[in-house]
Image: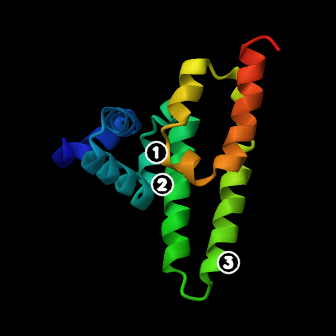
């Protein structure tokens, strides 16, 4: 599959491949797809299946790239990096309508490493969502 990433992009299937490999836990191939999109965005866009790109995938990929960029920035202190990272997470995830998520999705969110690192931010929103789902 990894050998055919460029062909998949040209055929307009790369975004679907990327999301499928991420969902199935094929992290190596998913990473190769993400890198191809990142390094060839204009080219991928021209053969686009971007309308199939889920917001979660886009936000997750963008956040991963931001984290890498922050870690490689030698001019920022650890405290500045943490503050900036926390603000990015809040900015991205504050637009999610947690009450519109079903209880199964909310439970799955508890297993996400990002949720564990930002418990306070997510738990408040998830509590509101659970109240809404229970009819309160």
Query: Which residue is found at the position 57% from the left and 45% from the top?
Result: 115
Q: Secondary structure at mark 2?
A: helix
Q: Which residue is mark 1?
A: 46
Q: Are marks 2 and 1 in contact (CB under 8 Å)?
A: yes
Q: Secondary structure at mark 3?
A: helix
**Front residue of 136 and 78:** 136
Q: Which residue is mark 3?
A: 80
Residue furthest top in the image: 135
Q: Is residue 7 left or right of residue 115?
A: left
Q: Give residue 23's mark.
A: none
For discs 1 and 3, the disc positioned in front in the rendered view: 3
For discs 3 and 2, the disc positioned in front in the rendered view: 3
Q: CA distance from mark 3 to mark 2?
A: 32 Å
Question: Which quadrant is the N terminus positioned in?
Answer: top left
Q: Which residue is mark 2?
A: 42
Number of residues whose C-alpha sits closer than 10 Å to that of mark 3, classed few (under 14), some (14–19) or many (20 or more):
few
Q: CA distance from mark 1 to mark 3?
A: 37 Å
Query: Which residue is found at the position 54% from the left and 54% from the top?
Result: 62
């Amino acid at each position: 599959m990894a050998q055919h990433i460029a062909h998949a992009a040209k055929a307009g299937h790369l975004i679907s491949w990327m999301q499928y490999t991420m969902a199935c836990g094929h992290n190596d191939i998913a990473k190769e797809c993400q890198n191809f999109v990142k390094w060839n965005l204009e080219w991928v866009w021209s053969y686009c299946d971007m309308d199939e790109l889920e917001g979660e995938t886009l936000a997750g990929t963008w956040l991963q790239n931001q984290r890498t960029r922050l870690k490689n920035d030698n001019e920022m202190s650890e405290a500045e990096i943490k503050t900036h990272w926390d603000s990015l997470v809040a900015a991205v995830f504050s637009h999610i309508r947690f009450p519109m998520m079903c209880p199964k999705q909310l439970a799955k969110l508890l297993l996400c490493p990002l949720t564990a690192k930002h418990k306070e931010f997510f738990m408040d929103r998830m509590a509101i969502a659970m109240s809404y789902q229970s009819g309160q």
